[in-house]
């Protein structure tokens, strides 16, 4: 049981769980097109154990029981993502009726159960035909994405509680085009610089398209880390500042102020798209809310031998989760307070937070992680941050991208052989808190 109570968050606070289409749906049929994660995961060496999303949690068929779990847990809301390749298999052009039907059923299923739908348009499963044209490196993606956003607004907009354009643009751009860890697996500065700008430009064009087509309550979901120096030296502090620019300020500054940090526009000048400055009004279109995903901190030291960004990340000595990320609730408080002080007075939502833990349905460490991070949210609220909701990552154990099925983030255990769902003790802890107070 948590030692905190639902009432501590006030009466209007939203509690939810989050997932993403590629990580849970499976169901790669009925007209669904290929995505970059299909080919990336089938390329040897990219994903632990060669795991793919072909089956995942078979949420495509088992969604009614998954929605029952959300309702029975006492959650108010479900943050899910639409699979672009299921809706528009070629990325642009013809719409797949079976895809529309699936999300119709899913959204109506939420509403029937009293669960508020929080949708994300893009959680990383880019249709492959768009990657063939350069994907996020091609400026035209702003139009492709806006057209997809129009479809979502027209078909589903009236039933969605809130809509986010992009999940974690740092991952879409930097992790996937510079570090090469996620699809499409590039390790190229020019590719990264282009993706870093186009992902936010496309966010802006999608906001315009959603709004013009009547969708309400629009936002974006940024993953932020607490960037800290590995020592007190001036050099390491500067390194942390560059790390902060790469991870946090590019996206916060771009979306909320229409400006990118000079620590990056300098070194990236030769690689950024020509005339990107003229897009900044679109990049920073007004929003209705901001989503923040938080997992851990980043520790940086100076590394003058590194080209372009003279920094290196070091391992910290805090307790770590099963994926090796340090457990650092204070970082969540600090980030929420910082964003509301320095960037925006928009309502903030913690749209993801959670931990990987070894397999099993007894997960006291995870329950404690949640409790400590919920306390961190309360503390940020006391310091004036307008945090309106919290979504646990994740409802289910699922396909953890390059880690495959090896890392488990679920409140509910999934047996991938039988697709049996078993609530863990962390799920019961949420249930206790949420049901006692409804
Ligand atoms: C986030 C992703 C999410 C999940 C968690 C663990 O970066 O948005 O899909 O993989 O990390």
Image: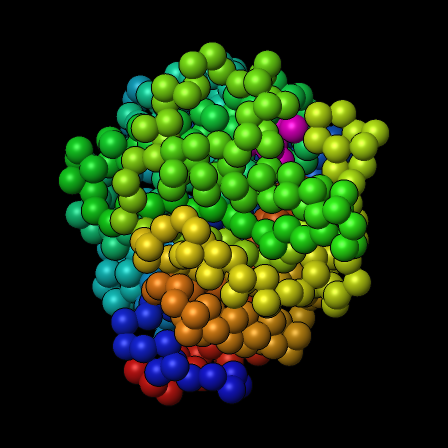
Which secondary structure is most common in the magenta stretch?
helix
Color style of the picture:
rainbow
**Residue 215 vertical position relative to residue 137 in the rendered view, above or below:** below
Magenta stretch? 173-178
Displayed quadrant of residue 49: top right
Displayed quadrant of residue 220: top left
Q: In the drawing, does residue 156 fall left or right of residue 188?
A: left
Q: Position of residue 265 (x, y in %)?
A: 55, 25
Regarding residue 115, the answer to whether it shows in the image is yes
Q: Residue visible at 74% across and 67% down?
A: 319
Q: Position of residue 429 (x, y in %)?
A: 51, 80
Q: In the drawing, does residue 247 fall left or right of residue 128?
A: right
Q: Residue visible at 70% across and 61% down?
A: 326
Q: Residue visible at 51% across and 87% down?
A: 3
Q: In the drawing, does residue 359 fall left or right of residue 391?
A: right
Q: Position of residue 349 (x, y in %)?
A: 39, 58
């Amino acid at each position: 049981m948590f030692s905190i109570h639902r009432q501590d968050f006030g009466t209007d606070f939203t509690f939810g769980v989050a997932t993403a289409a590629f990580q849970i749906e499976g169901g790669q049929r009925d007209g669904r097109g290929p995505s970059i994660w299909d080919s990336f995961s089938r390329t040897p060496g990219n994903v632990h154990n060669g795991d793919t999303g072909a089956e995942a949690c078979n949420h495509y068929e088992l969604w009614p029981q998954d929605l029952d779990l959300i309702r029975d847990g006492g959650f108010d809301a479900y943050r899910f993502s639409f699979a672009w390749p299921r809706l528009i298999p070629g990325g642009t052009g013809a719409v797949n009726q079976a895809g529309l039907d699936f999300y119709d059923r899913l959204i109506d299923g939420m509403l029937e159960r009293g669960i508020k739908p929080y949708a994300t348009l893009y959680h990383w499963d880019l249709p492959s035909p768009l990657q063939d044209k350069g994907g996020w490196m091609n400026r035209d993606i702003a139009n492709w994405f806006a057209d997809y956003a129009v479809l979502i607004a027209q078909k589903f907009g009236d039933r969605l509680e809130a809509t986010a354009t992009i999940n974690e643009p740092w991952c879409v751009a930097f992790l996937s085009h510079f570090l090469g860890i996620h699809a499409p697996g590039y390790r190229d500065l020019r590719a990264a610089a282009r993706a870093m700008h186009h992902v936010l430009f496309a966010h802006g064009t999608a906001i315009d398209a959603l709004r013009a087509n009547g969708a309400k309550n629009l936002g974006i979901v940024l993953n932020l880390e607490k960037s800290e120096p590995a020592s007190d030296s001036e050099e390491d502090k500067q390194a942390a500042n560059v790390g902060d620019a790469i991870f946090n300020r590019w996206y916060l500054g771009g979306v909320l102020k229409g400006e990118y940090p000079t620590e990056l526009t300098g070194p990236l000048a030769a690689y950024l798209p020509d005339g990107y400055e003229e897009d900044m009004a679109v990049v920073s279109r007004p929003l209705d809310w901001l989503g923040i995903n938080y997992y851990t901190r980043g520790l940086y030291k100076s590394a003058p031998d590194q080209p372009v960004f003279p920094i290196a990340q070091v391992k910290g000595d805090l307790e770590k989760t099963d994926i090796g990320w340090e457990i650092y609730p204070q970082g969540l408080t600090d980030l929420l307070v910082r964003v509301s002080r320095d960037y925006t007075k928009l309502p903030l939502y913690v749209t993801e937070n959670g931990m990987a833990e070894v397999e099993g349905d007894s997960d006291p460490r995870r329950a404690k992680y949640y409790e400590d991070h919920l306390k961190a949210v309360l503390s940020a609220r006391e310091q004036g941050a307008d945090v309106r909701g919290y979504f646990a990552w994740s409802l289910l154990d699922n396909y953890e991208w390059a880690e495959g099925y090896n890392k488990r983030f679920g409140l509910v255990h999934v047996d991938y052989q039988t697709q049996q769902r078993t609530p863990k003790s962390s799920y019961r802890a949420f249930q206790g808190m949420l049901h006692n107070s409804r």
